[in-house]
Image (tube, helix red, strand yellow):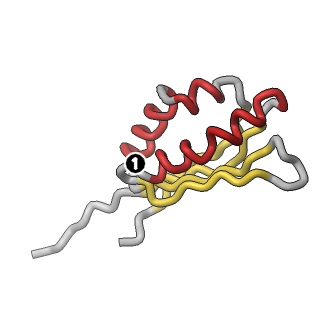
Amino acid sequence: MTNKRTVMPTVQLTGYIDVPENLLNEVLQALPDHVHNTRAEPGCLAFNVTQQTDRPTRFDVTEQFIDRQAFESHQQRVRLSDWGRLTVDVERYYEVTEHPSED
């Protein structure tokens, strides 16, 4: 009997957002809740948003989710959230990749 496992790839997003200066203070105030809410989502393995010191309107973003479904659920939640409404006009530069899980 062969033991076959289905390996589901994790989904990773890397990139950055550019926040218009007129939204910077609001984004900085809303960011801790956004990070907290995302890290609490089922399937979230890692989520970090870091403001660049030399360019304060740019934030580096890294996300990792257990699978495509968890990632898509996150995207849907964000679109409907206060963060999503606040940042609807923020420019996003992301690369989404899938990696074999390390089970």
Q: Position of residue 57 (x, y in %)?
A: 82, 41
> On the image, which quarter does residue 10 sit in?
bottom left
**67 is higher (above) or lower (below) than 69:** below
Three-letter residue code for mark 1: Glu
The quadrant in which the N terminus is found is bottom left
Image height of 19 relative to 85, above or below:
below
Residue at the location (76% across, 36% down)? 25
Residue 52 drawn at (x, y percent): 81, 53
Residue found 38% across the figure and 53% down from its top: 43
Residue situated furthest right in the rendering? 54
Residue 58's x, y, as percent? 79, 44
Foreground: 71 or 27? Answer: 27
Q: Quadrant of residue 82?
A: top right
Left or right of 31 on screen, residue 80: left
Q: Out of 4 and 70, give the one closest to the viewer.
A: 70
Image-quadrant location for residue 34: top right
Instruction: Tell me: 54 left or right of 98.
Output: right
Q: Secondary structure at mark 1?
A: loop
User: In front here: 98 or 76?
Assistant: 76
Residue 26 location, x and y as percent? 71, 33
Q: Quadrant of the C terminus?
A: bottom left
Total marks shown come to 1
Query: Where is 85 relative to 16, above or below?
Result: above
Question: Image point 64% across, 24% down: which residue?
Answer: 88
Label 1 CA crowd tier, 10 Å (few <14, some 14–19, many 20+): some
Looking at this rendering, what residue extends furthest in the bottom direction? 1
Which residue bears the numbered disc 1? 41
Q: Is residue 44 left or right of residue 19?
A: left
- Name which residue lies at 44% across and 44% down: 71
